[in-house]
Image: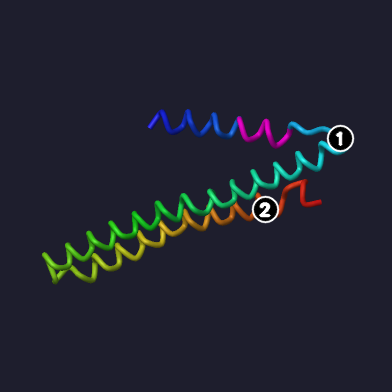
Amino acid sequence: MKKVSILTSILVLALSTVAFAAEGGAAASGGANIALICIAAAAALAVGIPALGCGLGMGTGIGGACSGIARNPEASGKITVTMIIGLALIESLTIYGLVISLILLMANPFLG
């Protein structure tokens, strides 16, 4: 788990230096293009990674609920309610990722 956070921080630092490296004149348009590419990639990752995790989590949750209902059909009502609440909480992660990506796309100085 620690390797992922170290690699992520190195990637963020590397992309931020590329995004803000250009200064004035003709170099600014090239730097702005690189910054827009970085922002678009970050926005795509901000939605894609949580969506992948949420899909895996929802599949696991629904599979567990189906197994529980198959083993104990009398508890299907409680299992279904708990599953729906859990799925709503899992889905909120994807919505947070969408909000972050919209902030990245709408509130950047390079779109001008």
In magenta segment, residue 65:
no
**The residue positioned farthest toward the left in the image shown:** 71
Decide whether the magenta segment is chiefly helix, strand or loop.
Answer: helix
Task: Name the residue: 40% across, 51% down.
Answer: 53
The local secondary structure at tag 1 comes to loop
Q: Quadrant of residue 106?
A: bottom right
Placement of 39 over or under 15, stated as above or below: below
Give the residue pinned by disc 2. 105
Q: Amino acid at mark 2?
A: Leu
Task: Name the residue: 46% across, 49% down.
Answer: 49
Q: Quadrant of residue 24?
A: top right
Q: From the viewer's perspective, is 74 left or right of 51?
A: left
Placement of 26 over or under 50, stated as above or below: above
Contact? badges 2 and 1 (CB < 8 Å):
no
Q: From the viewer's perspective, is 78 left or right of 22?
A: left
Residue 102, image x, y percentages: 63, 55
Placement of 43 over or under 68, stated as above or below: above
Q: How many marks?
A: 2
Image coloring type: rainbow
| Crowdedness near tag 1: few (<14), some (14–19) or many (≥20) residues, C-alpha within 10 Å | few
Give the residue pinned by disc 1. 24
Marks 2 and 1, how far apart in space? Answer: 23 Å
Task: Name the residue: 70% across, 42% down.
Answer: 35
Task: Name the residue: 60% across, 52% down.
Answer: 101
- Span colored in magenta: 14-20
Residue 107, image x, y percentages: 72, 50
Q: Nearer the viewer, mark 2 or mark 1?
A: 1
Q: Amino acid at mark 1?
A: Gly
